[in-house]
Amino acid sequence: MRLTRDGAPQDGAAPAVAGGAARRPPFGPVAIETAYDGVTCASEYLGWLGFWGVRGAVPRPPSGLDLRGPAVVGVVDQGTEQTGVRRVETLWLHAASVNALAVAFSVAGFDAEARLRAEGLRLPLFALELAGTPRPVNRAAELLLEEGAPGQM
């Protein structure tokens, strides 16, 4: 398998990794053409990481959370503007209130302030590529990819 400079496989598939749990098979991409596809892709990716019971919501509910599971909450931004710091902080507050891990996915990426704040909060950020494979954007996301869902695998 050939890798890009950032360590991702060139074919777009996430590599099988071995963390504290058994090896996972490669993630099966979900091409993103609609809002439903983006939420489905992120939900399935979280399931692949070991989070069980993750449900997606389209359209976005008043809470602003697109993804909910017993141990995780998340957002999926599919707009053309980068996700900002306010969205990251709001997600983190929602997660803290329900004692869950916050995870953010974005098609357009995250602005510099959002990335910096997410690093401080240890909040995983993933770029959601239209081919349907999330790619880690920060160290917290890389660790989640390496180790899988904490205590669930």
Image (cartoon, helix red, strand yellow):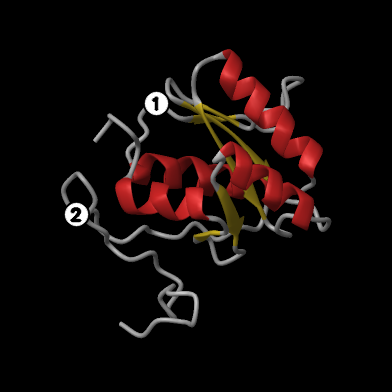
Query: Tag 2: residue type?
Result: Arg
**Residue carrying label 1:** 53
Q: CA distance from mark 2 to mark 1?
A: 20 Å
Compared across the picture, whether 51 is left or right of 136 comes to left
What residue appears at the point 64 percent right and 29 percent down from the top-left corner? 92
Depth check: 130 or 119 in front? 119
**Residue carrying label 2:** 23
What residue appears at the point 45 percent right and 30 percent down from the top-left corner? 54
| Residue 111 at least partly seen | no
What is the x, y in percent for residue 148?
A: 33, 44
Of all residues shown, which one is farthest toward the front? 120
What residue appears at the point 68 percent right and 52 percent down from the top-left corner? 115
Q: Quadrant location of the N terminus? A: bottom left
Q: Quadrant location of the C terminus? A: top left
Query: Tag 1: residue type?
Result: Gly
Q: Quadrant of residue 47?
A: top left
Compared across the picture, whether 60 is left or right of 44 comes to right
Depth check: 20 or 116 in front? 116
